[in-house]
Amino acid sequence: MFQRFRRTRLNKHLCALVRETQVSVNDFIYPLFIRSGKGVKTEVASMPGVFQMSIDEIIKECEELKQLGIFSILLFGIPDVKDSIGSDSLCEHGIIASSIREIKKVHPDMFIVTDLCFCEYTDHGHCGIIDEVNETVNNDATLEISAQQALIHANAGADMIAPSGMMDGIIQTLRTTLDKNGFENLPIMAYSTKFSSAYYGPFRDVAESSPSFGDRTTYQMDPANRREAISESLSDEAQGADILMVKPALAYLDIVREIKDATLLPMAVYNVSGEYAMLKFAGMNDLIDYERVVMETMISFKRAGADIIISYHAKEVAQMLQKQGV
């Protein structure tokens, strides 16, 4: 009778050959938060190791990322002045458009993804224009200014647009607008299944984007709804999305797998601020083997079906992979 070889008999090279799931530095997009000024690098208390940075510091950060093998970044802007419609995001000299141009001058090989939303730019902290009667976001009015924002990003040199506001019809609106203006080949990474999650808390510290009233449950996904979540992603695919995303990642790996099985599009996950902070503080207090837990978490994303991981851990993971000789 034949026996299967025992795991204990495998040396490390054979283990690598038969490993089913691999994590690579090429899987990652690293989020960056830009604000005005010079020499600004302010650590966020709720997210150790994550900073608000001025553009000169962002350019230095990009050099460090490239040394680690990370060439993809996701930009979030923090303007000096916020108003009811997020005017800074609708200006070609706004924080994001200016940053794209400056980064591309120094790092033309950096792949720049831009977050397209309004919560960081509005004085009320919601993701679009407010319908004051119902105190919720006016979907159609927000689609109009989202199209304006997308063109500003595209003209500044963005390599991919990532609309995160969860407005109905956003992908079709952006695809039509970009195509009509000569950006047929500019890809859209849809926040196609974005849940109304308590895991976003620390992000709102770093992006200074907490709603001043109410919440975002009217335009983000109910965490209890599996079938609706899958339907949302397939709807974005039909509207012309190039990449689908599930956000948050860790608590929704079942959704990642089901969407992956239902589409041939690449899948991204956003390993969000609350997930990051929990591991960070647990590691700082010696409650877990931090590096092993981080890597195990990344493997879980890939195993569930993610092709792309947006994560604040990206630099650390790249350093871990270098130590492993990967």
Image: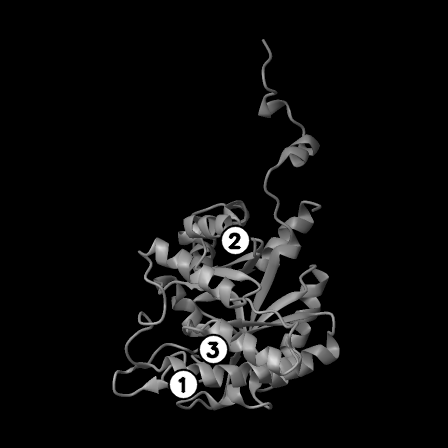
Which mark, by number, is residue 117?
3
Amino acid type at mark 1: Ala
Q: Earlier in the sequence, mark 2 or mark 1?
A: 1
- Residue at (56% x, 85% y) in the render: 95
Give how far apart the Cα atoms at labels 3 and 2 are. 25 Å
Q: Which residue is mark 2?
A: 263
Q: Earlier in the sequence, mark 3 or mark 2?
A: 3
From the viewer's perspective, is residue 146 above or below residue 311? below
Which mark, by number, is residue 141?
1
Q: Position of residue 277 (x, y in %)?
A: 44, 60
Amino acid type at mark 2: Thr
User: Looking at the image, what colour scheme do you see?
Assistant: one colour
Query: Could you say whether the residue bearing mark 2 is in a helix, strand or loop?
Result: loop
Amino acid type at mark 3: Cys
Question: Which of labels 3 and 2 is toward the front?
Answer: 2
Q: Position of residue 71 (x, y in %)?
A: 68, 64
- Residue at (68% x, 78% y) in the render: 103
Q: Earlier in the sequence, mark 3 or mark 1?
A: 3
Q: Nearer the viewer, residue 198 or 237?
A: 237
Give how far apart the Cα atoms at labels 2 and 1 are. 30 Å
From the viewer's perspective, is residue 184 above or below residue 238? below
